Image: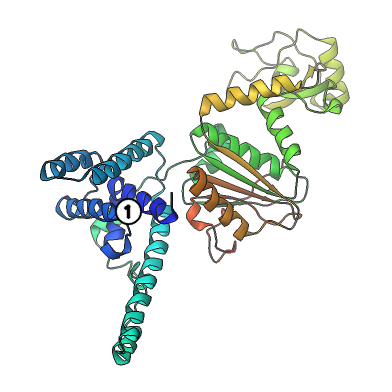
Amino acid sequence: MKGDDFIERKIIIGLIVSTDYIREVEKIWNPLFLESEMARMIAVWCLDYFRKYRNAPRKDIEGLYVAKMKEGLSEQQSEFIEAILQNLSHEYERGQFNEGYLLDQTRSYFQEQQLRQFAKDIEREVSAGQLIEAERLASSYRSLKSCEGEAINPFTVSAQYVRKVFEEKKEMLIRFPKELGEFWNTELVRGAFVALMAPEKHGKTFLLLELALRAMATGCHVAFFQGGDMSEKQQFYRICTYLTKKPGKKKHTNGLWVPKVDCLYNQLDTCRRAERECDFGVFHDASEINFENLVRASTDNPEYKPCRNCKNIKGSPWLIWKPPIPILPWKDAFLALRKWGERYKREFKLDTYANDTLMISDIRARLDTWERQEGFVPDVIIVDYADGGRILSVLFNRKIIGCEITAGHFHFLRKEIPCI
């Protein structure tokens, strides 16, 4: 499929499925911007429908197609429309239509088409010897960028605009449970930009991998760009150990003491509540509680049960012994990878670069290649740079790719994130 055919098919699908998209396209619409006669025809159907009903046609496109069939369509036109309807069905099944990204693509494509048409018009006048007309035409050029939108006065906007802003729901792409979820789930939404900052070797890459796999489990396609912190095989190893919860290195197979939340009143045997988990204590005074004594108490009292069954808990650590486990076999890793892929059925691409070689232009080029060759458009883009504490960023909504990563371009999550 040629590049023009590819983007024009996507534009048509956008006009069919998204009211917000068609509303913005109408502002810059010119039938000459589409090369395909069939694409222009369907675009006109959609725009006429929108102007009458103020909505995108969505599934009503099938009714429009049937009506036009009665008026008479060629075999070529019918084949083109049926291919569009098949792609449309895929968009509905996928459930992740990125309106902002497609709108940016459309504006770029229309601007390119406008410049080509403008150059042809000037060349035609020059060839005909109409230099004055060619000069007049050249001075009349107006970029589509001037039509993209106007500045607003927040104090005079309509009630409809204010209502739309307040009722707009942010699509949450990644979800964490409990307190961590309360901390930043509302920030992990489409269109957001989040930066994780910490000193070297404090767990940033670990947390980015957690974000990536949770995004995939939520139903998102993920692109993970890695710039020198780890090799491809090292990151692959981490993914395998994450999924199997088994160590990939021999030094991690030894047994260890794992902390667990307990209640001081349970340990001192001063609790008299019926819901208490244990019926005896292991310490006489809180000053006795340290690592060595906890190891000894846990070893000598295998029947002791830590307790956190009531709201009056006074937190105190307890230690549970985890015995040595065997190193992760490659077959277990392979089966875990297949099981995860079959369960969530989402694309995950890990793209690794040598240190100091990953640029925004590389990311843009790779994303364009994936989209054209495979139809892959990520919902979540993660970029991991190994440069000693500079921004390791999670990018949502591909439309922001290509801008410099500075505070002037993005809203940062300005919250303290505890180091891991």
Residue appearing at x 69%, y 27% in the figure: 315
In this picture, is 209 found above or below 294? below
Label 1: how many Cα within 10 Å (few below 14, some 14–19, many 20+): many
How is the model colour-coded? rainbow
User: Amino acid type of disc 1?
Assistant: Tyr
Q: Secondary structure at mark 1?
A: helix
Does residue 164 appear in this view? no
Q: In the image, residue 219 lies at what x, y percent?
A: 48, 34
In this picture, is 319 found above or below 118? above
In the image, 297 versus 171, the foreground residue is: 171
Most extreme residue toward the bottom is 132
In this picture, is 121 found above or below 354? below
Residue appearing at x 70%, y 8% in the figure: 279
Relative horizontal placement of residue 223, taking residue 80 as reference (left or right): right
Most extreme residue toward the left is 71
Quadrant showing the C terminus = top right
In this picture, is 275 found above or below 21? above
Residue hosting label 1: 21
Relative horizontal placement of residue 68, taking residue 410 as reference (left or right): left
Relative horizontal placement of residue 4, taking residue 28 as reference (left or right): right
In the image, 259 versus 372, the foreground residue is: 372
Relative horizontal placement of residue 151, taking residue 243 as reference (left or right): left
Q: In the image, residue 34 lies at what x, y percent?
A: 32, 60
In the image, 288 versus 292, the foreground residue is: 292
